[in-house]
Amino acid sequence: MQSLLAELRAAVIDPDAGPVRRRQAARQLARLADAGVPGADPADWWGLTAPSTDEPVETTPVRVNPSKVNRVRECALRALLERTAPSSAMAMGSAFHRITEILGDVDIEDAEQALRDAIPELTDEPAWRLAPLIEEWARALHAWRSWEGTQNVVGMEVDVRVPLGDDIVLTGRIDRLAGHPRDPSKLTIVDIKTGKAVSKDDAEADAQLATYQLALALGRLIDGPDGPVIGPDPTRGSEGGNGGGDGGDGGGGNGAHAPDASILGGATLVYPRDPLSGGDPKTRLQAARTGEQLEEWADVVTGVAAALRGPGAIATPGKHCEFCTVRLACPAKEGAR
């Protein structure tokens, strides 16, 4: 029926179809509409009715979470419409993150037991799979603790709320901030990942890490009531900064002051569940961004904010379409449903 409707609708609006064919198609569509067939009535056709609203999706200032930047760049429409369904993998990953937070306050044995107790409540894996899964997560906890012990951690679960100009706020949470091992004046962003390690090239291009680097360079690490936070830097106005650290010489787009790249020690992805042969977690690095790179990335993030603001959103086809849960409502996939 859907293919018939598509053929009839195409014939009705095709100026080259000829008057007879168009009238016949219109007559058949009218019969189908009278019978209540969905999609036969032109009132239901996309593009023929006025938008229900032209109000923006997000009000100013638009909040941009670094974890969403890459999804918006892939397809703005999907990022606006799709909501990730909870899964056992996500639940176990969240539990792992929470337990790593208490490692400094409890013995590793107690933390491991808490993790072992939590996993069976978060997954419906069969018994034969559950036991090795628990052992895998337990090894990951020890791998993380061993790796973290080599770092000079200065902040844990660090809240981020940094303005980018007048209309955008970068918001999120950094798993760990660590002092750079060779330069104590620099800070390294650490992100715990509970999946498989990505390639080195993918890590270097990671949009989430780059956006957190931008936030750190635009803001200031301050003491909050619950620990360190990255917030606005009151000492730097819209014309402030130091010329963008080791690259920039301007004030950035969207009225933002120049990011200070001198504080950046890069970023590290840590994969406790994907260990090396010796048991240490695999890591992937993103180099510290220069002032020029930060200025360019600020323009990228400004474009992401514009897409999030709406009310329009561009549908961009790509490999991601295969796994998109809103593809049946996507104008870019018309005829491929």
Image (cartoon, rainbow, N blue to C red):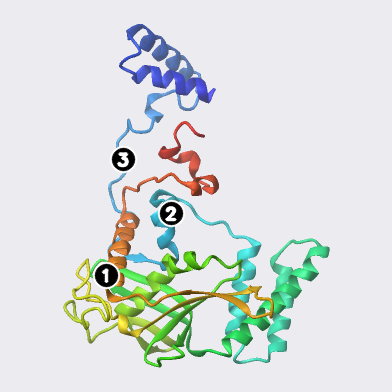
Residue 329 as seen in the image, left or right of residue 166: right
Which residue sits furthest top?
20
Q: In this figure, which residue is indicated by the disc labeled 3?
A: 51
Q: Which residue carries the number 2 mark?
A: 79
On screen, residue 247 above or below 128: below
Give me the C-alpha separation between circle 2 and circle 1.
24 Å
Q: Position of residue 97 (x, y in %)?
A: 58, 76
Residue 61 visible, this angle: no
Q: Residue at x 39, y 14 (%)?
A: 26
- How far apart in space, not on screen, are marks 3 and 2 (Cα)? 20 Å
* Residue type, mark 1 in image: Glu
Dot 3 or dot 2: first in sequence order is 3
Q: Quadrant of residue 240?
A: bottom left
Name of the residue lying farthest toward the left: 239
User: Which one is nearer the viewer's eye here, 173 or 153?
Assistant: 153
Residue at image x 43%, y 44%?
317
Q: Answer few, some or many: residues within 10 Å of disc 3's Cα (few below 14, many 20 plus, some between 14 and 19).
A: few
Describe the element under mark 1 as helix, strand or loop: helix
